[in-house]
Amino acid sequence: MKHRYIPIFLCAALAVGAMTGCSSSSDDTQEQTAEETTDETADDSTDETAETEPVIYENEDLNFSAELPELLKDCMYVEVSETTAYDDTINIVKVYYQGEESDQNIFTFEEMDQAVWDSIQAEGGPVGTELGVSSSGRVVVLNSMQSNPFEEGTDDYDKLNDIFDQMDIISETFTFLDE
């Protein structure tokens, strides 16, 4: 039963993140954020829960979930698309970091048939990290960016490096939903 609330929490976190980003550029947004923070801290148990709640990405259509780096909590959004390779569909989930300077696609989940994944690996090019194979023969692969696109010494550069340091949580917590 507890897992039914995860999608609701994630959607709410993504909506708030999409509206506020990692930083606020207008006074109205800063005031609204301050009011929301005050309301949340009025109840100590709510404040503690907000600090310890993991950031979970769950995709029921693609049948998987994983915990994401906690630093993405208020500064990320997701885009889902698809492409075709080897006459089959690859479903792509792009996770973006919303920075002060710009938004950056920092990693993707790619969901595909086992035969497509085998063909991609046989090409010998750069491949991502296989997170798992479902009982139905679908593979999910994690691809992350190779370098930090932000200027060294900026807040975005430092935060993105900290996010990269937390990336192991994805492979450690990845699971298929119905297995």
Image (tube, rainbow, N blue to C red):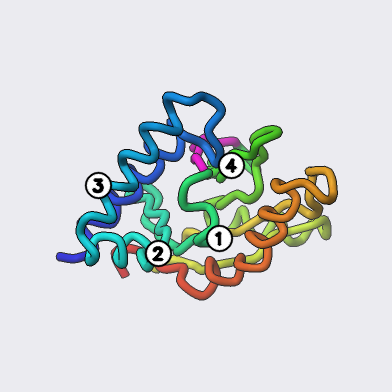
Q: Position of residue 151 (x, y in %)?
A: 83, 43
Q: Is residue 31 left or right of residue 88?
A: left
The residue wearing badge 4 is 96
Q: Is residue 98 above or below residue 118?
A: above
Q: Position of residue 111 (x, y in %)?
A: 52, 52
Residue 45 in which image quadrant = bottom left
Q: Which residues are magenta?
A: 76-83
**Secondary structure type for disc 3:** helix
Calculate the distance from the C-alpha at mark 3 to the C-alpha at mark 2: 21 Å
The residue wearing badge 1 is 114
For the N terminus, the image quarter is bottom left
Q: Nearer the viewer, mark 3 or mark 2?
A: 3
Q: Residues within 10 Å of mark 2 (few under 14, many from 20)?
A: some
Q: Is residue 160 left or right of residue 90?
A: right
Q: Nearer the viewer, mark 1 or mark 2?
A: 2
Which of the marked residues, 3 or 4, is nearer the chain's N terminus? 3
The residue wearing badge 2 is 54
The residue wearing badge 3 is 39
Q: Is residue 35 left or right of residue 77?
A: left
For the C terminus, the image quarter is bottom left
| Residue 119 vs residue 125, the one in the foreground | 125
Q: Nearer the viewer, mark 2 or mark 4?
A: 2
Calculate the distance from the C-alpha at mark 1 to the C-alpha at mark 4: 26 Å
